[in-house]
Image: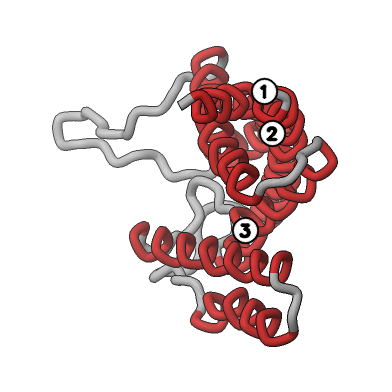
Amino acid sequence: MALFRRLLFAALCAGLLSGAVATLAHQFGTVPVILAAEGHEPTPAVGHEGHGHAAWEPAAGLERIFFTALADGLTGIGFALLLVSAYALRGGAMSPRRGLIWGAAGFVVFTLAPSLGLPFRLPGAAESPVFDRQVWWLATAVLTASGLALIAFRRRLPWIALAVMLIALPHVVGAPQPVAPGGTVPDDLTRRFVLIATATSLLFWLSLGATTGLFYRRIVQRA
């Protein structure tokens, strides 16, 4: 129980700090592009009595920043729990430098590999069914993580060959594609968003790896 509390505290510290880094990156990077894309969305349909039925969204300004920070913080804590649990299972000394390697692996598993088939999309872009995207994204993350683990911890040719097959499998099968291609967002804005969102995710994962390595060493290992 004491170990669990230390792991949880280390994950909370690292997750909140990395979430704050992600929030700053979002405010100066992705949010301006999303706002620009929202200007290209069609006006929501209005009912016969003149009342629209648009979905709720946070208001611009402090409310949007608050909910962005909340989402980034919770995301950071969740992924930090995965990392510190992996550190505990793996064993051995941890440090911010080693944490960076784990963070880079997390970026490959949860961002880079899935985005090869399901790139970041702006509001107004054509989308495939949500359930199909969720299944493919989860399968890609699991298979990529398994492949990287085999490469890192087995280091023998048969295991490496199996790892390559696992990593390639979801891309051979193919990601679900939009039923109706197109959308209202200009292509140059989409490309800009993909680049910025990918860079933001990389910054988040590197900061998460470094901070989990740091807090794991100070809170878990030194205890």
| Picture disc at residue 223 | 1
| Picture disc at residue 49 | none
Badge 1: residue crowd in 10 Å (few <14, some 14–19, many ≥20): few
Of the image marks 1 and 2, the number of the one nearer the N terminus: 2
Q: Which residue of the protein is positioned furthest toward the right in this rendering?
A: 97
- Left or right: residue 45 versus residue 141 is left
Q: Which residue of the protein is positioned furthest toward the left in this rendering?
A: 49
The amino acid marked with disc number 2 is: Thr
Closer-to-camera residue (38/141): 141
- Residue under the image location 73 percent in, 65 percent down: 152
Q: Residue 177 appears at what percent x and percent y?
A: 46, 71
Q: Mark 2 points at which residue?
A: 212
- Left or right: residue 54 versus residue 182 is left
Inter-mark Cα distance, 1 to 2: 15 Å
Q: Residue 184 appears at what percent x and percent y?
A: 52, 53
Badge 3: residue crowd in 10 Å (few <14, some 14–19, many ≥20): many
- Left or right: residue 51 versus residue 24 is left
The amino acid marked with disc number 3 is: Val
